[in-house]
Every structure is written in structure tokens, then in C-alpha cells.
Image: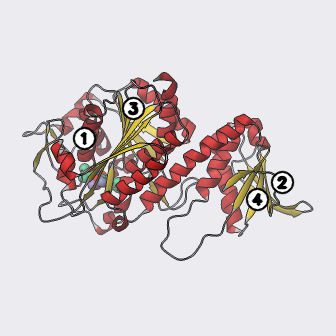
Amino acid sequence: MVKLWQGESAQWRVELETGGEGTALSLHTGAQGRVLIVNLGGEPTAETARRAAAKAVKTLRGLEAASAVLDAAPAVKALGPEGPAALAQGAELACYRQPSWKEEPDKPFALYLAGAEGPEAEAALREAQAVTRWVCFARDLVNCPANLLTPQDMAQRMAEAAGKQGVEVEILDETQTRALGMGAFHAVGDSAAHPPRLIVLRWRGGKEDTPPIALVGKGVCCDTGGYCLKTAAGLKGTRGDMAGGAAVCGALLALAENRVPVNAVAVIPAVENRLSRDSFLPGDVIRSMSGRTIQVNNTDAEGRLILADGVTYALQKEGASRVVDIATLTGACVAALGFTTAGLVTNDEGLFLALMNAAQRAGEQYWRLPDFPEYRRMIDSPVADLCNQSNDGCGAITAGLFIGAFAGDTPWVHLDIAGTAWVDRPRWEYQVPGATGAGVTTLYQLCRGLADAQ
Ligand code: BES
Ligand code: MN
Ligand code: ZN
């Protein structure tokens, strides 16, 4: 949608101003044609550029415009080659449309960037546009209703996209995962007639013998809560519960498309959490892939169960040296941090700083939750090695620590995107109602940052 301007004529010109109040707008019709002025704010950053471009294209599309030229020079001046890249990202994310099953084609819109020529700016633009494409891919998957995206469907869509990027794909079916002893994954996965899948995507852009970083994403294609059944209101959000899985897939494919020299593996346990004759029950004791037993206090705390086995798989079978897990995990995280900020739990200062740095570059917000030693008692069980829920409050921390128990001493970061993965009402200009693509860009930037160090 965004291209470098090469003299094409366009209906609108977009000009960027600095020094004002964020993204304020004004419209003029004069001798030069129609002009829209957008403000980058007093101290422009990549994030204010993304917001300004998003505001501009939303306004223009609201006016039924078909094309515009945006003069990127002020962004280049303020931000260097990252300026036009951020503008393109904001514009493209704001133009995103949900997949629709109506026969109503979307009106095309072209945005040209002027004043963004030069090898550095063009390279930054290409990289950003590739990442944006995979953010939109993640949004597409998350927006897809549960009846059209079973674990098998998701595996197929991911495998197809990965194949085109030269990414190695392995889809483990239920016989294979059972043979691996993934009992926590199966406790949930076997609740549904649609069988579970373990989706593994490998990008080996780094040195042959460097162990990969593992990105483990929750792939719950629908979450009814199981026997701990959700209410009607709770069931409405059921489709988006694979946003963590979509994020790790998007990030990995963006690394591949940009040929980032890093070794990374995405692990996506894909299941449905349903209610059926033989579904697991509260009180059940199950055996995880790690050998540790888990008392299931609540069947609606299913994400941590499948992630426990996902993390164990990443360590034992992929030899991961670092683990990031990402999930729409807890309502408690939304209660604590709302819809703009995701929760974070970690056991490693270095990986934490790298993640925060990546988030800053990505324009995403994460906030670290405490992991004081006494909190660990919340996952103690009288009859098993662990339990999956406690009544001690701070549910976002309990959930994180539960997954962390399976990471052991391996550097690990847990991201709870329950609030940020989906917005009924956009919180930033470049969002549209529905899936946000949360996590894709941060995970991409994290791995890209590790590339040199690895
Ligand atoms: N997927 C949900 C969490 C969720 C809630 C995501 C709201 C997005 C919006 C998760 O599987 C869940 O049901 N969590 C329970 C855990 C509880 C039973 C310990 C929750 O948060 O209520
Ligand atoms: Mn649940
Ligand atoms: Zn869930």
C-alpha cells in the first residue's frame, strides 16, 4: 500500500509538522490542491510518527480518498532512516481490514512517501514493511472465528506461509505428541473433537551450532473454559485465545523474510478448550512432559498447561538457550494493566532488558510484575508437584510463575497479552477494532537484537 513516490499524481498531499500537540490535523484546499497537515508532536519519536501516519490515512480514507503523497522529509530530519519506516508502518497498520466473508471489495488506497529516498531509508522501509505484513498476518489469524480456524486449520495456514519463506515446518499430530508424553497439552487438547497440533517453525539464519531462542505462543483456537465453563459474555472473546501463537509465528516469519542472522524456533501448542463427555475435570491430576504432575484446580486455566509442555518441548527437543512465552493468559492481567500494556514475568535480568529495549523499538508497552519468593506457594499442591490455579489473588503472577517453573534456570520471559491482543475500541491510531497483532514486532526486535550477540 505504501510506496516511494516517483512522480505519481495523487488527490491529497500530507504534510508533517513538528512542535505541536501530537497528531492534531488541519485540512486545506488551496492552489496546491488538497492538503492535510498532521503533527508529529514536540519531540518526534518513531511511535509518534506511526500514530501521525495512521491518523492521516484514517482521515483520508474517511473522506473516500484514493491516493495521497506524504512528504516524509520532516520525519527523516527528526528520526533518520527509521522515520519513513515508522510512517509506513503506521499507515499500513491503520489501513488493515479484518478478513470478511461479505462480498464487498475494499476501496483501494495508495500512499506515496516523498523525500524518503536513499539506500538506508529504503532498507529500513523494506524491513519495516515486511514486519508489518506479518503483524497483519497475525491479525488475520486472530480475527478468524473459531469455526473457521481449528488447530489443524491454523497449522495448515502457518505451514503454508512458512514454506514460502524458507522456514522449516514440523507439525506434530496427536499420536506424536502423546508419544512425547505431553500430558498437560493433551489434558486440554483431548477435550475437543478437533484434534490438537504442536506447530514448530524453525528459522536457522544464525551460525550452525548456536542454540536457538524459543518463542512459545499459546494457540487456544477457542476457549470455552471447559467444565469451568465461561459465561456468555466470557465466551465472546473465545476466538482470540491463539494470539500468542499468531504472534510467535508472525515474528518468526518476519525474521525469515528479512533474513535476520539468528536461530529461532516458534513452538505453538494448538488446541481447543471445550466441554465434552470426556473432557478433563477440576481436581484431575495430570503428568506433564517434564514428568512433573499437575493438579488441575480450574479447567479454564488451560493456557498455562499447554505452555508448560510447549516450554518443555522447546528445551528438551529444540535445545533452546532462551525462552519467551507469550499468551492471552489471564483476565487478572487486564484488570491490572488494561488494554495498552502487557504483563511480564521473568527470571533473567539480561533477557528482561533486551525485551524492554525491543518493546521500545516496537512501540509496545510491557510492565514487569514482581516474583517475590512467597508467591511461589500459590502453585503448590497437596497432592501433585504443582497446581494450575490459586485463590490468593494476583492471578497474572501465578500464571507466569507456573510457566516459569517449567523453564527452570534457562533465561525466560513471560508476556501476558490478554489485554493488548484485542481491542473492541482502538487505543492507538494504528489499531482497528479486533486483533492488534500484539507481540509480533517486539519479538522480532528482540531476536534481531540478539542476532549479533548470539
Ligand atoms: N484466555 C483466558 C484469559 C483471558 C481472559 C484472555 C480475558 C483474554 C481476555 C484464560 O484461558 C482464562 O480463562 N484464564 C482464567 C484463569 C483463571 C481461571 C485462573 C481467567 O483469567 O479468568
Ligand atoms: Mn481459559
Ligand atoms: Zn484461554
Residue 120 in picture, x, y percent from top left: 71, 34
- The answer to whether residue 44 of the structure is visible from this angle is no
Q: Which residue is mark 4?
A: 68
Per the image, the residue denoted by label 3 is: 213
Task: Estimate the spatial distance between the alpha carbons at disc 4 and disc 1, rounded to whole Å.
Answer: 49 Å
Q: Residues within 10 Å of mark 2 (few under 14, many from 20)?
A: few
Q: CA distance from mark 3 to mark 4?
A: 41 Å
Contact, mark 1 vs mark 3 (Cβ under 8 Å): no
Rendered location of residue 322, percent (x, y): 36, 29
Q: Quadrant of residue 280?
A: bottom left
Residue that numbered label 2 is attached to: 7
Q: Is residue 349 above or below residue 137?
A: above
First along the sequence among labels 3 and 4: 4
What residue do we see at 16% from left, 38% from top? 386
Check the picture and name the quadrant holding the N terminus: bottom right
Residue at 29% in and 29% down: 372
Looking at the picture, tell me which residue is in the foreground, 323 or 345.
323
Q: Earlier in the sequence, mark 2 or mark 1?
A: 2
Is label 1 or label 3 in front?
3
For mark 3, does the 10 Å Cα neighbourhood hold few (<14), some (14 to 19), or many (20 or more) residues? many
